[in-house]
Amino acid sequence: MANFPVIDLSMLNGDERSATMTKMNDACENWGFFELVNHGISHDLLDTVEKLTKEHYAKFMEERFKQMVASKGLEAVQSEVSDLDWESTFFLRHLPVSNINEVPDLEDDYRKAMKVFAAELENLAEQLLNLLCENLGLEKGYLKKVFYGSKGPTFGTKVSNYPPCPKPDLIKGLRAHTDAGGIILLFQDDKVSGLQLLKDDQWIDVPPMKHSIVINLGDQLEVITNGKYKSVMHRVIAQSDGNRMSIASFYNPGSDAVIYPAPALVEKEAEKTQVYPKFVFEDYMKLYSGLKFQAKEPRFEAMKTMESTVNPDPMATV
């Protein structure tokens, strides 16, 4: 098995740019994942976010999680649990309107750090979308325009902790799925592993690396690239010891953005007709919410039946 792709973003500024872009393109085509180092987000900020996230869990969420486990009798299960994830989570919304000031239990220093962190990740996501455009031969800014809708993209963060699990062979930290949205930026624990992706019918560990940002592609980028890039099934394996931190930020299309294969990519592959449907992102999310832990292909097929209702000229300009 080839090594998990690790991309040094600083190499884009020198003689290694072409090789780095090729490596990123290969990762998007063959892995759906890659790990970024030297991505421009300060290590001090990452260390602060990690410290405050772990403190927040211990202070506000750990006891609630233990009560949930006790109430469901999960410590004593004897057969596989297929409808529950061993995780403690909360969500922050950044765009189009932030809710970070309304989320309870966030202390001021944590709230402030997460605002700065979100702004850095938003910039990194937009930089990456332009690099994908370059690799795909699309005009600069194309992906951001498609994502824009009438109110701009949707951007939010899922903050998760995966506490020690007494039955890791029977309960997943997070069940296997593809991500519904656009581009996902993950800041994960560098000591406690657990994230795996499915490649060539094998589960491959995503290596924990200090100060790295793991990138993966969602279903929308598979549609826009007409399958050239693919979203990939991934999961989190619960661990018997160690509390794994995971901060996943989702840079997604706006709710009313219309998603469809880029005409330039369909035209480029003359022998390959448009394979993927055209749909409104919000409609896809409504379908996804009930089918997250199932294969993506039936979701795409279901959206094809709705195509006739979609505005044929949907793209907003920024």
Image (cartoon, helix red, strand yellow):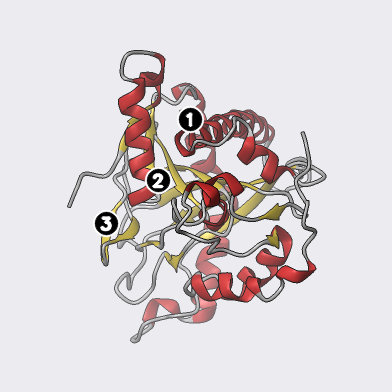
Question: Image check: 27 left or right of 64?
Answer: left
Does residue 64 lie above or below 139 as drawn? below
* Residue identifier under label 3: 204
Name which of mark 1 and mark 2 comes first in the sequence.
2
Between residue 119 and residue 71, name the one nearer to us.
119
Quarter of the figure with the C terminus? top right
* Residue identifier under label 1: 46
- Could you tell me which residue is drawn at 45 percent across and 58 percent down? 271
The CA distance from mark 1 to mark 3 is 25 Å
Question: Image check: 79 left or right of 315?
Answer: left
Disc 3 secondary structure class? strand
Residue 102, percent across and down? 78, 46
Name the residue type under label 3. Answer: Ile
Dot in front, 1 or 2: 2
Does residue 88 lie above or below 154 as drawn? below
Residue 57, percent across and down? 53, 49
- Could you tell me which residue is drawn at 66 percent across and 55 percent down? 259
Dot in front, 1 or 3: 3
Between residue 54 and residue 265, name the one nearer to us.
265
Camera sees residue 278: yes
Between residue 72 and residue 216, name the one nearer to us.
216
Residue farthest toward the left in the current orientation of the protein? 1
Disc 2 secondary structure class? helix
Residue 316, percent across and down? 78, 42
